[in-house]
Image: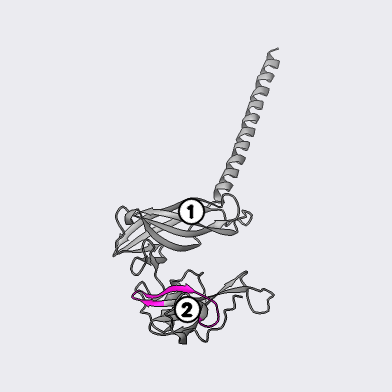
Amino acid sequence: MRRQSIRRVVSGAVLAVLVGCGSQTAGTAEETADAATAAAWTLAAPIRVDGVRTADGGRSLVVGAEVPDGAPDCVRGLRGELETVEHGTVYVRVTYETRSLDRESGCTGTRRVEATVKLGEPLGSRRVMVNSFNVYTPAGATPPALRKCGENGCDPTPPRCASSSYRQAVDDTDVPEHTSWEERGCDDTWLVLDLSTRMGPVCGDTGDGCVSSGVSQRWFYRAEASGWQPVAMNGDAGCAGIHDILPKLPARLCTSLPRLDRG
């Protein structure tokens, strides 16, 4: 009887150890799955910053940004924060967590979001640098929006009939990046540009079977202290259509305009 009791005790102890090991193994698997899920979220910066404006009497900045989209839970934890203020420039940072790096996440599209950055005091005349790359300035801007600084810096390029001045005009126009232009007419007061933006898939060499279309727009600009300012769009041939909008535009700048091919 005593030996049987000992056997039962030993058998019970072995069973307890096995059960404990089984629980520990299951727990480890769950922790591994949780770790894998957490690893799928990656801290990232916006795909593109498309505008900055002031709010709350200049004590806040609202940063417009493009982030991944296309499936539930593509982005979480959108955050805008003030980093530092040095030498007349306010440095801010916009970040979020995303799973778009996971090919199976479905986050292959984009959407626009806005992140608010509290400054604590009015921005005034200071410039704003977002994520150590995009620079915006209130100089020459229409409040509450700030003006994006271009490749020539933040100082407005004087309105003139030159390529650098045309570049600033395009930068100040609401069109996608990498838009090209063709001058149609220019004088001391007026500028006419045909803008073209490629749309569709990104193509390689000619003949690779990839076809992308273009979207064209004709913009009219007027010279102001801050540079060429976009004032109207019209794709009609000649002056009739644009003179309904800008009657003071000289006829020599519109008489020979062809009808715009919108692609």
Residue holding disc 1: 96
Answer above or below: position of 40 versus 182: above
On the picture, is 76 further left or further right than 121?
Answer: right
- As helix, strand or loop, the secondary structure at mark 2 comes to helix
Answer above or below: position of 209 versus 114: below
Q: Which of 87 and 198 is in front in this view?
A: 198
Residue holding disc 2: 243
On the picture, is 51 further left or further right than 198?
Answer: left
Q: Which of 226 and 257 is in front in this view?
A: 257
Q: How crowded is mark 1: few (under 14 residues within 10 Å), some or many (20 or more)?
A: some
Residue 233: in magenta span: yes
Residue at image coords 71%, 12%: 1
Q: Kindly indicate the quadrant of the structure image that contains residue 235.
A: bottom right
On the picture, is 183 further left or further right than 31?
Answer: left
Q: Which amino acid does label 1 sit on?
A: Tyr
Residue at image coords 52%, 87%: 256
Q: Nearer the viewer, residue 20 or 148?
A: 148
Q: Kindly indicate the quadrant of the structure image that contains residue 222.
A: bottom left
Q: Which amino acid does label 2 sit on?
A: His
Answer above or below: position of 146 versus 119: below
Q: Position of residue 69 (x, y in %)?
A: 57, 56
Q: Which of marks 2 and 1 is nearer the N terminus?
A: 1
Residue 35: in magenta span: no
Q: Where is residue 130 in the image (x, y as percent from the top left)?
A: 40, 62
Q: Nearer the viewer, residue 29 or 55?
A: 55
Q: Where is residue 229 in the image (x, y as percent from the top left)?
A: 41, 74
Q: Kindly indicate the quadrant of the structure image that contains residue 124.
A: bottom left
Q: State the separation of the CA atoms marked 2 and 1.
A: 48 Å
- The magenta segment is 222-239
Question: Quick check: marks 2 and 1 in contact, CB under 8 Å?
Answer: no
Q: Where is residue 241 in the image (x, y as percent from the top left)?
A: 52, 77
Image coloring type: one colour
